[in-house]
Image: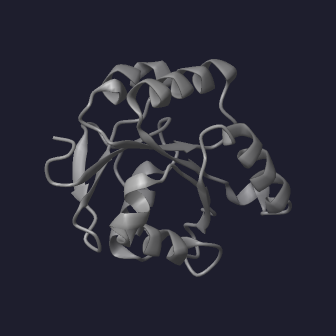
Amino acid sequence: MAGIGGVHLAVVGPFGVGKTSLIFSLLSQQRVVASLEPTKEWWPRVYKRNTNITLWDSPGYVELRDVIERLADVFYDGIILVVRDRMRPDEMKLLTTLLRNKSKRLIVVQIWSRSQKHKDSDADLAATYAEFEHLRKDIFQVDLANLELYGFHALVRHLNNPDNYSTSRLVLQAFHCL
């Protein structure tokens, strides 16, 4: 399906990290306040502001290698990887291999909990840059609890512009206060 009907992005991450909340925030342009049911099947969601983009919600994984075969499929043009903490070296190696072998786009979303209090977001952003430096191009900071903070609207503008999106490899850092 990739190349037919636009750009298909697989949204993946561990169980309960906030994949579906991120998708609904992007779709509605509003903060998601309700608890959402866990996703059990891969489910397409058309990004209404740029119908060229389909976001594929996925069930959570225990290990990244649990979904790597599905991600290697040519069906997906890119991956939105939602994480809470730093990736383990074995996960980074798997991700790097997948992206290099299949030329897929990447968005990395790092979710923060309320207990982290945003006390050193600059240091965390620098660490995220360093971790994904060999894969990154564009970086957006998003707070899913308050979409007016950081770069949520810049991300929306970027996704709405197919010229920007078609050639970029993105790294998105999202701060999420529950």
Which quarter of the picture shows residue 142?
bottom right
Q: How far across and down, in percent of the image, does residue 57 sit? A: 32, 46
* The C terminus - image quarter: bottom right
Is 122 left or right of 145, judged from the image as shown?
right
Q: Is residue 115 above or below residue 108?
A: below
Q: How far across and down, in percent of the image, does residue 140 sit? A: 60, 63
Which one is nearer the viewer's eye here, 134 or 115?
A: 134
Q: Is residue 84 above or below residue 178?
A: above
Which one is nearer the viewer's eye here, 8 or 37?
A: 8
The residue under the point 41% across, 23% down is 68
Q: How far across and down, in percent of the image, does residue 170 sit? A: 52, 52
The residue under the point 35% across, 36% down is 59
Q: Does residue 62 appear in the picture of this structure?
A: no
Is 157 left or right of 56, judged from the image as shown?
right
Is 94 left or right of 162, judged from the image as shown?
right
Q: Does residue 129 appear in the picture of this structure?
A: yes
* The N terminus - image quarter: top left
Q: How many marks?
A: 0
Q: Is residue 152 above or below residue 176?
A: below
Q: How far across and down, in percent of the image, does residue 144 sit? A: 55, 67
Q: How is the image coloured?
A: one colour
The residue under the point 58% across, 76% down is 146
The residue under the point 79% across, 46% down is 127
